[in-house]
Image (cartoon, helix red, strand yellow):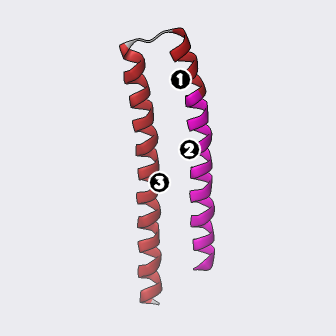
Amino acid sequence: FLGSCAIFGSLSLAALYAERRSMLFWEVCQQHFITHQQRAWDKVFWFLISGLNMLVMMLFFIIFLGLYMVFQEKKRKN
């Protein structure tokens, strides 16, 4: 059980780290876009990207939660 907790922890940390890196990357790109041209589709594009990031994080969270529930059920049966 502790092993699964450790796996959860490391995976969530990795996900957070990846999120942080991608956020930095997108910030740099956004800065580049803002300095060059300001079009309506740029705003839409960035909105979509941030939405996608949020969705990915939510998906990770739901998957982790589901796995945790399964582990709890298995532990209860034993």
Mark 3 Cα-neighbour bin, 10 Å: few <14, some 14–19, many ≥20: some
Is label 1 in a helix, a strand or a loop?
helix
Is label 3 in a helix, a strand or a loop?
helix
Q: Nearer the viewer, mark 2 or mark 1?
A: 1
User: Label 2, label 3: how many angstroms apart (C-alpha)?
Assistant: 11 Å
Q: Which mark is residue 30?
A: 1
Q: Position of residue 46 (x, y in %)?
A: 44, 26
Residue of label 2: 19
Callouts 1 and 3 close, C-beta under 8 Å: no
Q: Which mark is residue 66?
A: none
Give the quarter of the image for residue 29. top right
Q: Residue farthest to the bottom? A: 78
Residue of label 3: 60
User: Label 1, label 3: how many angstroms apart (C-alpha)?
Assistant: 25 Å
Q: Where are the magenta residues, as a range?
A: 1-27
Question: First in sequence: mark 1 or mark 3?
Answer: 1
Question: First in sequence: mark 2 or mark 3?
Answer: 2
Q: In the rendered structure, which amino acid carries the disc numbered 2? A: Glu
Is label 2 in a helix, a strand or a loop?
helix
Residue at position x 39%, y 21% from top?
43
Q: Nearer the viewer, mark 2 or mark 3?
A: 2
Q: Is residue 18 above or below residue 69?
A: above
Q: Position of residue 48 (x, y in %)?
A: 39, 30
Mark 1 Cα-neighbour bin, 10 Å: few <14, some 14–19, many ≥20: some
Q: Is residue 70 above or below residue 60?
A: below
Residue at position x 45%, y 58% from top?
61
Q: In the rendered structure, which amino acid carries the disc numbered 1? A: Gln
